[in-house]
């Protein structure tokens, strides 16, 4: 089964993609994490990507598509997080998705979630200082690596990311709605409640 998780920044895409991978043992591919991995390598491409990410701007479609295409090549089952998120990416991707899970979230809720997010520097698991804290302060529960605050967690970058979402990703939502493979999930609830609804959609 090929699934994509879409939704505004802070909707919980990363959180739920990880929970699904843990429960159903299906590999997730997180566009943002793949790009941040490239940044870590400090290559010319990585430096270019860092500039886009830090300013909350989408990286060019060609870069995003090339990275994702390489990752999912030949795979029959996967969960995509944050891809495709422009109509150009949809067209260029050419994979037939079985379901697109659209997690809706009010802006003010998303913003407060992003303010408290901490992410593992190694395995990319996502925590929240209040709603989903790690067992040990500043350390990942699973791999014990250091948690960090993302460089695009600034007020300006978040505003920009929300704007991109409206302009670039809402048309993608409409596209999948018309294809009748979109399932809308109310993400304005607790992690447990939202996940209960999402996991029901998984029949492997
Ligand atoms: P990306 O990393 O995808 O960022 P985003 O879309 O802005 O989404 P976030 O990761 O911020 O939020 P999320 O929905 O995953 O929420 P999370 O689970 O972490 O992209 C970053 C950048 O990369 C982009 O700006 C762009 O530059 C580039 N990029 C990425 N994809 C691209 C593409 N396809 N094309 C071009 N460029 C691309 O949860 C947030 C917090 O809330 C956490 O702390 C979590 O614990 C908590 N939380 C989650 N759900 C709940 C809940 N229900 N209740 C309480 N707390 C919750």
Image (cartoon, rainbow, N blue to C red):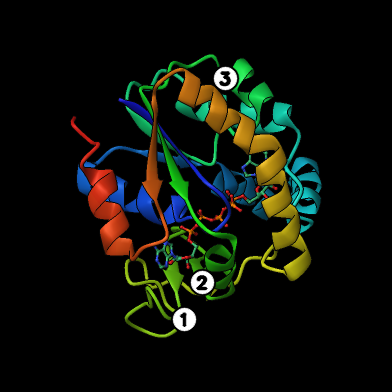
The residue at the point 40 percent across, 21 percent down is: 180
Q: CA distance from mark 2 to mark 3?
A: 31 Å
Question: Mark 3 touching mark 1, by CB under 8 A?
Answer: no
Indicate the secondary structure of the residue bearing disc 1.
Answer: loop
Mark 2 vs mark 1: give the one in front: 2
Nearest to the eye among marks 3 and 1: give it.
3
N-terminal label among 2 and 1: 2
Q: Report whether the residue tagged 2 is closer than 8 Å to ligand 1.
A: yes
Q: In which quarter of the view is residue 128 placed?
A: bottom left
Residue 143: image x %, image y %? 36, 66
The residue that disc 3 covers is 93
Give the crowd class for mark 2: few <14, some 14-19, many >=20 residues within 10 Å.
Answer: many
Residue 141 picture quarter:
bottom left
Gap between marks 3 and 1 measured at Cα: 37 Å
Residue at 69% in and 61% down: 158
Location of mark 1 (residue): 138
Of labels 2 and 3, earlier in sequence is: 3
């Amino acid at each position: 089964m090929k699934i994509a998780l879409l939704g505004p920044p802070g909707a919980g895409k990363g959180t739920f993609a990880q929970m699904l991978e843990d429960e159903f043992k299906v590999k997730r591919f997180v566009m943002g994490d793949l790009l941040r991995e490239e940044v870590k390598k400090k290559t010319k491409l990585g430096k270019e990507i860092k500039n886009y990410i830090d300013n909350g701007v989408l990286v060019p479609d060609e870069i995003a598509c090339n990275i994702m295409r390489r990752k999912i090549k030949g795979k029959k089952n996967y969960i995509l997080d944050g891809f495709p998120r422009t109509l150009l990416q949809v067209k260029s991707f050419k994979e037939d998705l079985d379901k697109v899970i659209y997690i809706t979230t009010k802006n003010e809720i998303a913003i407060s979630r992003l303010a408290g997010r901490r992410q593992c520097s190694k395995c990319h698991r996502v925590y929240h200082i209040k709603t989903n804290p790690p067992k040990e302060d500043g350390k990942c529960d699973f791999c014990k690596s250091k948690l960090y605050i993302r460089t695009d967690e600034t007020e300006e970058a978040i505003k920009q990311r929300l704007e991109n979402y409206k302009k670039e990703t809402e048309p993608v939502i409409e596209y999948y709605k018309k294809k009748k493979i979109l399932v809308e999930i109310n993400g304005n609830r607790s992690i447990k409640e939202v996940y209960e609804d999402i996991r029901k959609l998984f029949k492997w």
